[in-house]
Amino acid sequence: MSRISAVLVATGLLLVGCGATSTNSTTLTPGGGSGSSSSSSSSSGGGGGGGITTTLFPVAVGNTWVYNDTIADHPGGTTTNMMTSVTPDSGGQKVTIKTHSDITGLPATPTTLTYQFNSDGSIEVPYAQVGNNTVTIKSGGIVWPPRAQLESGQPHTSTLSLQIKVAGRTTNVQAHVTVKGGGTASVTVPAGTYQATVVVETISEHFSGVSVTIEVRTWLANGVGPVKSVASTKSGGVSETVSTEVLKSFTKG
């Protein structure tokens, strides 16, 4: 395992992007829509959707995405994500996604992730833990801003207060999060070619005398959701790609 990957496992820090695992590397998942071009139509929440309409991340019970994974120090495999519930609440919609990874050398235990789709168009995305250590979020969260803010390039900043238990020792860590739009780009994945909005998420922390910066770059296609995600790290001037996920298929619920 590389030095940077070892730091990630030690801190329990997360990656948010396409598919999510709770093992030695992570990412997040949504995704959707197969075909050669992105859809221009909106996708509203189904199964108790509450009337919120999204274009960059379709919401409906039964929506299922399959991703091809490439993860550092592992041969790779696939991750399957399915929306299992969409529940209206005071802020918008609470969405549950069940994710299951089949990656050589990593546990295949299913994980349930909860997203909050807010009425202003922002999305609160879950923190996905890496490694076998215990990580507790004491305060803060990760937010993808509304589409208009992504297109403007204006960043959204937040701070995660984490409590990490490693080898019987507890450490408190402050992780600084910045999420902003990275423009639009054409991206080709096994599911097709899409014109996508790029979301750039940067997480910085200092742990055990080491400063680590994690960048997760996610491509979101209209009516499809995340179609590609690349997570990389930088520490001590050394950069490394930790994981890449690309959309293989999508089935609407």
Image: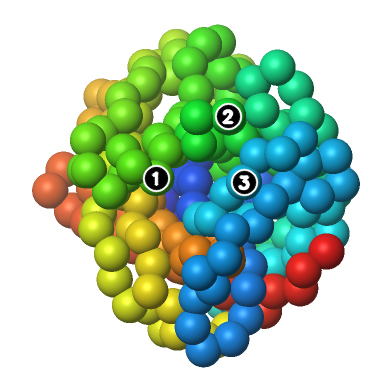
Amino acid residing under circle 2: Ser
**Would you name the residue on which mark 2 appears?**
119
Amino acid residing under circle 3: Thr
**Would you name the residue on which mark 1 appears?**
147
**Residue ID at (76%, 73%):** 251
Q: What number is the disc on residue 179? A: none
Residue 211 appearing in the image:
yes
Can you give x and y, in whole percent of width and height, for residue 149 in the image? 31, 38
**Residue ID at (51%, 89%):** 36
Can you give x and y, in whole percent of width and height, for residue 112 in the image? 78, 42
How far apart, in angstroms, are the residues tagged by discs 3 and 2? Answer: 9 Å
Q: What number is the disc on residue 53? A: 3
> Which of these two is toward me, 180 or 66?
180
Q: Of label 3 and label 2, which has the lower sequence position?
A: 3
Can you give x and y, in whole percent of width and height, for residue 245 in the image? 51, 68
> Which of these two is toward me, 99 or 104?
99
How far apart, in angstroms, are the residues tagged by discs 1 and 2? Answer: 12 Å
Q: Of label 1 and label 3, which has the lower sequence position?
A: 3
